[in-house]
Image (spheres, grey):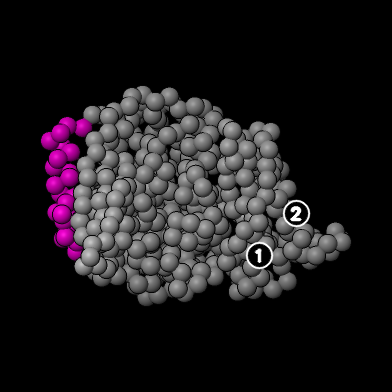
Amino acid sequence: MAFTPTLFSKASLFQTIHHSNQRPSMAFTPTLFSKVSLFSYRRTFCIQLASAFHEFQPNKKWRQPVASVLKLGGVKIAKDEIVRDNPTNNVPDSIFSKLGMQLHRRDQHPLGILKNAIYDYFDTNYPNKFDKFDDLCPIVSTIANFDDVLVPADHVSRSYIDSYYVDSETVLRCHTSAHQAELLRGGHTHFLVTGDVYRRDSIDSTHYPVFHQMEGVRVFTPADWEASGTDATSYAAEDLKKCLEGLARHLFGGVEMRWIDTYFPFTNPSFELEIYFQDDWLEVLGCGVMEQEILKRSGRVDNVAWAFGLGLERLAMVLFDIPDIRLFWSNDERFTSQFSKGQLGIKFKPFSKYPPCYKDMSFWISDSFTENNLCEVVRGIAGDLVEEVKLIDNFTNKKGMTSHCYRIAYRSMERSLTDEEINDLQWRVREQVETKLLVVLR
């Protein structure tokens, strides 16, 4: 079940349910596309992008590939099938360009280093037990992304404001739990799923519309718990806590830990694990005993299972001292050269700190205005040059009209921005905000 962070308060889907638009996070992928559409070709677990998307050569400066076609299970999918001018599609070019980048599969990248460290823990403590999946297709059906993990029909995470829809029945996965049901139906009883996930979100140093999660699931049979003298749920919960406390020690050393009872729609009971690290309590992950309905739908009536989910970025930012989530996408050798395969916790050394430039923008909002839509517009124009979009003032006049004032911080991680460049970006942002969001600039 993938939990996803709002990076420093909640760590995964189990976690997102509490804030950041109440979004759940068990991510697993179904029979990927059950409908007859561009994605109904075949069941597939693997996404393969043309040439450069898979190959990463650490000795050469890596450049983001420009691709108009990607391959899913051997079937070519054109960009205009993912990014379309259609009322049911809200995937921008900037998000399409991230498909297949798979930072978590690069052994010398902080996310890949962290993923492999977690793999090492499970391989050592549960040899030959857990199947590992890190290349499952991120384009999934709404059934897999929501229904199979018991996300309520009226949950905010299903809205076009929060998720990226290819069409009304297909989304870019919001969590790795989108693969849970299919893997369970396929006979897998112990598995780890790692992948890139996609959510429309705010803009600041700890949020990005594409990030990475890992989810773990373990299924038990009656023979496992009957000899213990405890009931199935208690047995699974105890095993879960023992497993994850060991994982926390593996990553962070001999830290103090505490368990927090919480609520997730797909587990019962549900917990969050916090550790005392660098003089503060840090939420590491969310977890729980899987709801029996999920197992029942997967044909496992007599079983019990646990699941956990964690956000790779939130943990990597702490372990490697990385101050801004945008850095994970940097190709600057001053960043990439600092990390080596198998070296967990190397502290990032800032190579420079360029000054930010702030621009304010005020407008009368419409009834349909949302901050997520504003952030999508700003990102679509400024890309990774925008560091933060923050509401700094709002008021309602006597006529009932509401005004918002947002401060946009522009800053490159790699160079100084010119006044001309920033002014051009801000002018284009103002134009698009007024046109696309139906607001009235002040």
Q: Main secondary structure of the magenta part?
A: helix
Q: Amino acid at mark 2?
A: Glu
Q: Amino acid at mark 1?
A: Asn
Q: Position of residue 70 (x, y in %)?
A: 32, 55
| Rendered view: 299 above or below 126 | below
Q: Residue at x 46, y 69 (%)?
A: 155
Label 1 crowd (10 A; few <14 / some 14-19 / many >=20): some
Q: Which residue is mark 1?
A: 268
Query: In screen coordinates, is 427 left or right of 201?
Result: left
The one of 388 and 385 positioned closer to us in this rendering: 388
The one of 251 and 104 positioned closer to us in this rendering: 251
The one of 44 and 257 positioned closer to us in this rendering: 257
In contact (CB < 8 Å): disc 2 and disc 1:
no
Q: Which residues are magenta?
A: 417-442
Q: Quadrant for the N terminus, please.
A: bottom right
Q: Position of residue 259 (x, y in %)?
A: 67, 49
Where on the picture, by quarter, is residue 227? bottom right
Label 2 crowd (10 A; few <14 / some 14-19 / many >=20): few
